Image (tube, helix red, strand yellow):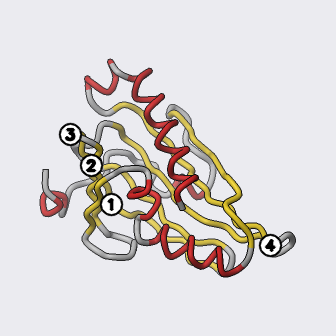
């Protein structure tokens, strides 16, 4: 699978944008946050890294994307070993104290769903937090069979996302 193969492919789930609100029923949910430092400068560095797919790369994925910085419509092809994870950015968060993006799965991804990668600054205590919110369900026969192992891998990678930004 190549990045150029993703153009025009439909998302594989109907609840587009749901990581920004209540997560949909019928999926495995992930909602994790971790303090990664303090200060506005730390927030800005982390936000820049997140928007350039730094959480993905830091977790060990090889990433190619149609834009250097995440924007709505960007196609992203993550690869972990022989496994491809084709996605499209479905929304971007660009607020004073919060930045990030969410992408949704495209055909060929082992799961169907959406994942949001973000960073948040709390002015009250000067803390900076990395965040990951996701919902997914197996999309292939082999990911259904391997669901317990896939769930473990997802937890490990999600923890890496938080620790690397």
Residue that badge 2 annotates: 79
Residue contact at pointers 4 and 3, CB within 8 angstroms: no
* Label located before the other in sequence (1 or 3): 3
Q: Position of residue 16 (x, y in %)?
A: 44, 55
Please tell me whether residue 61 is drawn above or below residue 152 in the rendered image: below
Q: Nearer the viewer, mark 4 or mark 1?
A: 4
Q: Position of residue 152 (x, y in %)?
A: 47, 28
Displayed quadrant of residue 13: top left
Residue that badge 1 annotates: 88
Callout 3: 10 Å neighbours few (<14), some, many (20+)? few
Please tell me whether residue 119 is drawn above or below residue 60 in the rendered image: below
Callout 4: 10 Å neighbours few (<14), some, many (20+)? few
Mark pair 1, 2: CA separation: 14 Å
Measuring 44% from the left and 49% from the top, which residue is drawn there?
114
**Residue closer to the observer: 68 or 160:** 160
Callout 2: 10 Å neighbours few (<14), some, many (20+)? some
Residue that badge 3 annotates: 82
Residue that badge 4 annotates: 126
Q: Nearer the viewer, mark 1 or mark 2?
A: 2
Measuring 81% from the left and 75% from the top, which residue is drawn there?
123
* Label located before the other in sequence (4 or 1): 1
Mark pair 1, 3: CA separation: 20 Å
Q: Secondary structure at mark 2?
A: strand
Displayed quadrant of residue 21: bottom right
Mark pair 2, 4: CA separation: 35 Å
Callout 1: 10 Å neighbours few (<14), some, many (20+)? many
Please tell me whether residue 32 is drawn above or below residue 156 in the rendered image: below
């Amino acid at each position: 699978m190549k990045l150029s193969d993703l153009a025009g492919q439909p998302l594989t789930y109907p609840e587009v944008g749901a990581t920004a609100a209540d997560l949909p029923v019928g999926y495995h949910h992930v909602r994790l946050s971790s303090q990664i430092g303090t200060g506005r400068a730390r927030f800005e560095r982390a936000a820049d890294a997140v928007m350039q797919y730094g959480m993905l790369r830091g977790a060990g994925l090889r990433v190619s994307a149609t834009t250097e910085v995440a924007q709505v419509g960007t196609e992203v092809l993550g690869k972990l070993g022989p496994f491809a994870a084709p996605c499209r950015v479905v929304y971007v968060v660009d607020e004073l104290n919060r930045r990030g993006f969410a992408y949704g799965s495209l055909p060929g991804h082992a799961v169907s769903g959406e994942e949001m990668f973000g960073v948040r600054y709390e002015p009250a205590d000067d803390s900076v937090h990395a965040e990951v919110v996701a919902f997914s369900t197996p999309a292939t026969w082999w990911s259904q069979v391997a669901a317990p192992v896939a769930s473990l891998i997802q937890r490990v990678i999600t923890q890496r996302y938080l620790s690397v930004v």
